[in-house]
Image (tube, rainbow, N blue to C red):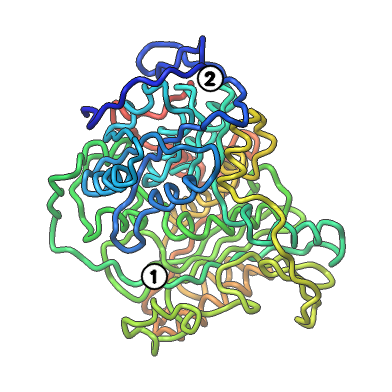
């Protein structure tokens, strides 16, 4: 795509002597950037503005957040839809702030006047843009989840290390929530031995509706670029710019949308820097028939030793009396909770538990509430960009990859699963006490919503075993599971084997 408007060349010495051409164009990428001084602006580009539909666009939030950080200048914006891009450009013009605008991220990455980018695109674009940016000598701030599949996440880590880039992946558990401080309290032994970690994502998700056929492509949108690595398919959803979350070619369901913030926190709590040896998922898309493909109700068990992770996703309310079209606006009142929390990490120990940023004894009496002491994620990213020290990141790309991989493991088990009777599922989960309890709650929750599992059965995924070091499945079901580790990429939008 053509560059929409061109600003004059500004002579800068920060990257002097470095060749920043993207390696896909045949040139060798820059290995590093100069350490910036306190008075040097970090010139940032926001890739993926987002629409006004439903949540208003995460890219818009990145623009607002990073404009507040001293020494950061938003130098460019990129979005494949002019309906999203042009209004933001006009806001910069109204403030008399110069900004370049692009529809093709490849053109943006050729710009030597860009130091770093934020990636707020749909999930299926995250990895490729991050890898291209590393190759082009840019630092990267990637919105969750890191990747769309397991293969991509590892390639992001390899690219960041090879090109000496600062690459952060966002997570609410690593931000200013107080959870990190509460977790440190646990790690100091104040609540005794860690038993297991329970993540919950009880967030209302109403039906996305069902269209009668392919939807028209907006004239303002370059749909080829929007699709990128994914197949070029008809649009079969009403809200093109948001409901992709619930379609497998682009999104990762609610586990990868909201749940990843807390699934990452679960992995922080068990203290593992590798994938679990086994995983199983149970779930389904219950309560409505729509264009969504991903489950709205899911229980996943990650068989870490000695303390496993259980993660629950619920999109339906407490019971069917709330299914009146109003419940999504009254989430706290209408959704279930687990030990008083609805979207959080609960760390169970011998002598008590932590729920979000609070520690309780076994009787549920509050012991202590923890206030955040760490940095805002955007501030932390900019600090690391200046120091060139990735160890300062609160959410390094490796952490983002490992936590996103937990999404992919859960979804792969689910996607390989088959509908089973309640008795068959109950038999399969016996022997794992906390998983069996989670399944009981799963059944009770659906029953309260008028869903009888003997008539509308749940999907039981297989127990999948994994080689954590190689990040590949082994044993029974491995042939089919490993097919979902990556995807068939559409040329020229291919995540490379060798970054």
Which label lies toward us, 2 or 1? 2
Q: Residue at x 25, y 59 (%)?
A: 239
Q: Is residue 86 visible?
A: yes
185 versus 439 height, above or below: above
165 versus 203 height, above or below: above
Circle 1 Cα neighbour tier, 10 Å, few/some/many (<14 / 14–19 / ≥20): some
54 versus 325 height, above or below: above
**Residue 212 lies in what quarter of the image?**
bottom left
Q: Name, please, the residue furthest toward the bottom.
A: 321
The label on residue 14 is 2
The label on residue 352 is none
Residue 411 in the image, given as x and y percentages of width and height = 47, 53
**In this rendering, would 173 be left or right of 299?**
right
Query: Which SS class for mark 1?
Result: loop
Residue closer to the observer: 121 or 388: 388
Q: Residue at x 35, y 82 (%)?
A: 326
Q: Which of disc 1 and disc 2 is earlier in sequence?
A: 2
- What residue is shown with label 1? 205
Residue 245 in the image, given as x and y percentages of width and height = 36, 55
Residue 97 in the image, given as x and y percentages of width and height = 36, 39
Circles 2 and 1 in contact, beta carbons < 8 Å: no
The N terminus sits in image quarter: top left
**In this rendering, would 289 be left or right of 176?**
left
**Residue 290 lies in what quarter of the image?**
bottom left
């Amino acid at each position: 795509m053509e560059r929409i408007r061109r600003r004059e060349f500004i002579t800068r010495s920060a990257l002097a002597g470095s060749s920043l051409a993207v390696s896909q164009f045949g040139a060798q990428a820059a290995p590093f950037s100069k350490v910036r001084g306190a008075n040097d602006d970090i010139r940032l580009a926001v890739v993926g503005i987002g629409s006004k539909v439903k949540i208003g666009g995460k890219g818009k939030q990145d623009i607002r957040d990073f404009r507040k950080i001293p020494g950061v200048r938003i130098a460019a914006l990129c979005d494949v839809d002019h309906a999203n891009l042009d209004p933001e450009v006009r806001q910069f013009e109204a403030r008399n702030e110069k900004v370049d605008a692009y529809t093709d991220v490849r053109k943006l990455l050729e710009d030597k006047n860009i130091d770093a980018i934020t990636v707020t695109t749909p999930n299926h674009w995250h990895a490729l843009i991050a890898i291209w940016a590393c190759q082009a000598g840019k630092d990267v701030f990637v919105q969750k989840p890191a990747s769309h599949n397991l293969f991509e996440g590892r390639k992001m880590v390899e690219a960041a290390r090879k090109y000496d880039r600062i690459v952060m992946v966002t997570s609410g558990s690593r931000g200013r929530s107080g959870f990190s401080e509460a977790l440190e309290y646990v790690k100091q032994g104040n609540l005794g031995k860690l038993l297991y970690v329970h993540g919950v994502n009880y967030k209302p998700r109403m039906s996305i509706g069902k269209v009668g056929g392919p939807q028209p492509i907006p004239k303002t949108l370059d749909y080829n670029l929007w699709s990128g690595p994914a197949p070029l398919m008809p649009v079969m959803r009403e809200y093109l710019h948001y409901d992709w979350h619930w379609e497998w070619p682009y999104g990762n369901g609610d586990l990868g949308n909201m749940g990843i913030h807390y699934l990452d926190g679960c992995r922080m709590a068990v203290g593992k820097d590798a994938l679990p040896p086994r995983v199983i998922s149970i779930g389904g898309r219950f309560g409505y028939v729509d264009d969504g493909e991903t489950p709205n109700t899911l229980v996943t068990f990650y068989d870490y030793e000695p303390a496993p992770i259980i993660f629950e996703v619920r999109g339906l309310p407490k019971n069917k009396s709330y299914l009146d079209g109003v419940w999504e606006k009254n989430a706290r009142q209408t959704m279930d909770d687990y030990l008083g929390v609805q979207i959080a990490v609960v760390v169970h120990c011998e002598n008590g538990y932590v729920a979000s940023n609070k520690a309780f004894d076994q009787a549920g009496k509050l012991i202590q509430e923890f206030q955040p002491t760490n940095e805002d994620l955007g501030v932390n990213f900019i600090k690391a960009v200046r120091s060139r020290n990735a160890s300062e990141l609160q959410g390094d790309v490796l952490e983002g990859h490992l936590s996103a991989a937990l999404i992919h493991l859960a979804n792969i088990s689910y996607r390989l699963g088959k509908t089973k009777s309640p008795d068959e599922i109950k038999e399969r989960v016996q022997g794992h006490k906390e998983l069996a309890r989670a399944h009981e709650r799963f059944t009770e929750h659906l029953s309260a919503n008028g869903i009888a599992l003997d008539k509308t059965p749940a999907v039981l995924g297989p127990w999948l075993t994994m080689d954590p070091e190689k990040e590949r499945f082994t044993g029974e079901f491995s042939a089919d599971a490993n097919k979902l580790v990556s995807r068939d990429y559409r040329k020229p939008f291919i995540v490379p084997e060798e970054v």
